[in-house]
Image: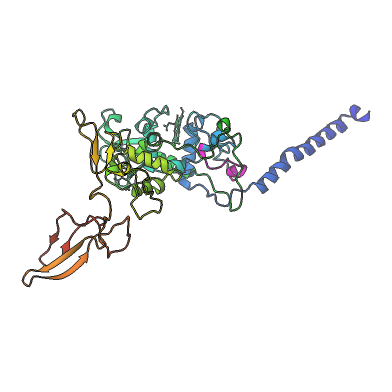
Amino acid sequence: MNIFNDHKKLFTTAGLLFLVLTFFTAIQPALKNQKYNAPLPASEPLSVDALAGKNIYISEGCVGCHTQQVRNVDMDKMWGPRPSIAADYAGIHRQDFWRNTATLLGSERTGPDLTNVGNRQSSKDWQLVHLFNPRIVVAQSIMPAYSWLFDIKNVPAKGDVIVNIPAEYLQGDTGKVVATKQALQLVEYLLSLKQTELPDGTAAPDFLYKKESKAGKETSKPAALNGVALYTANCQSCHGDKMQGLTGPPLTNIGQRIFYDEFKNIILNGRGRMPGIPHVDEQTTSSLFRYMGGIPRSFPGRRGDNKKATGPIVDSGGARIKLDTNRALPMSDYPEGISHPENRYTSEYGMEWMGLAAPPWSSIVAYDLNKGTIKWRMPIGEDSAYVKGDKSKGAPAGTLRKGMIITSTGVVFATAKGG
Ligand code: HEC
Ligand code: HEC
């Protein structure tokens, strides 16, 4: 054939074929991808600091241990509410001249996937402490410490971000640990890692290969976690392994200091710098509350689901408390090593709410001692749990055993439950 004898014709034909194939297999799909894979409408571009943080993430080699991809398999469910899709990676640009487009999907998962870590660990303090030395907050962690992202200063300058590091992690240094700009930028990047919501009405792809329920039994609800497990997994990093407090306040016997409803509210919605964990079920929160020394109960009238005990009267009388496992208001544990009776009993007398009295439950009363009359009477306190915002009811505990201050001009300072 002529074409095989004429090298010009041969090379032109092969060259053209190469170009046509390149167009159909590489250029055209790339153009299409660009057109159809715009970033999700709700996604936000990285801030300048977060972008700088991403470069630090790359240069420190975090991708060697951390993925950023939630695969569509059931075991990845813990890393994000939905599997990652192509649009999650759209709009990712080349970092700079030296560094290529970094999607940072990663292929090695020695540490947790970080796709959604900004939602999971949204506390800046926690992230800084963890970077300085992961063992401070996760005792068993094998992640390296990135302490070179921090300075130790005897006199921190104004505006320095000081990180509270327990003394035993400072190897004798007595200065304050100050986060460098790089540490702050890296944390800014980590906090920006949040899985973007799909536009309304778009169904997320399914997680596949769900674990079959055993023997056909119904297990549609995930088994309730027990409180201790939840504490270890979600609370200990900020509140300490013995509830002694770290970046969060100590929680020793918190169950005896706050009411169950408030406790549940804190867990579900977070408070201040503490992130909430909205997916915890009732059984787990109540088990956790017990673990923290409280009795999980809502107060009568507050919720409609209080059940009356059925059966013989002896079942609903004074409650026997199992020693040390099931502490109850107002009893505290005996100190350790002290011998004490096997069983303890409590009555709810004076401990339950409301009793039989109608509001106002407590008032400040001004007497005219010359005439023996009452000059005025004001309800005091506010029961935030029961009649929130209603100042006419007073608080059940009132000012009981709390002193008042009266100034010479007649201003009264008094505290009561609810402020
Ligand atoms: C040798 C592997 C390794 C390297 C390198 C590494 N990590 Fe980790 N990382 C882990 C492990 C293991 C954990 C889980 C234990 C823990 O929380 O410390 C973890 C946990 C984390 C967490 C908490 C995730 C969560 O869900 O609670 C963050 C955030 C994190 N790493 C960020 C980083 C950053 C940023 C870098 C780079 C500066 C980095 N890691 C480098 C192994 C590593
Ligand atoms: C990222 C760190 C962090 C995590 C994780 C965390 N907390 Fe907190 N927690 C805090 C901080 C900070 C406060 C103080 C909030 C405020 O009042 O500003 C707090 C406050 C509390 C309080 C109120 C304390 C009081 O004296 O009023 C309770 C109760 C509590 N946390 C329980 C929990 C439980 C239970 C968990 C686990 C499910 C948990 N926390 C996880 C940081 C954290």
Q: Please give the name of the residue rendered at 24% of the width and 44% of the height, measured from the top-left corner.
A: 347
Q: Position of residue 86 (x, y in %)?
A: 62, 42
- The image quadrant where one finds ligand 1 is top left
Tell which of 345 and 165 is nearer to you: 345
Residue 156 visible in the picture: no
Residue 342, quarter of the rendered image: top left
Q: Would you say 114 lies left or right of 382 here?
A: right
Magenta region includes residue 343: no
Residue, far bottom? 371
| Image quadrant where one finds the C terminus | bottom left
Q: Position of residue 111 (x, y in %)?
A: 47, 31
Q: Please give the name of the residue rendered at 32% of the width and 62% of the height, measured from the top-left corner.
A: 389
Tell which of 364 and 189 is nearer to you: 364
Q: Which residues are magenta?
A: 78-92
Residue, far front? 312
Residue 210, quarter of the rendered image: top right
26 up-or-down from 4: above or below: below
Q: Please give the name of the residue rendered at 33% of the width and 51% of the height, measured from the top-left corner.
A: 299
Q: Please give the name of the residue rendered at 31% of the width and 44% of the height, measured from the top-left corner.
A: 313
Q: Position of residue 308 (x, y in %)?
A: 37, 48
Q: Would you say 35 lies left or right of 256 here?
A: right
- Total number of numbered discs in the rendering: 0
Magenta region includes residue 91: yes
Tell which of 146 and 3 is nearer to you: 146
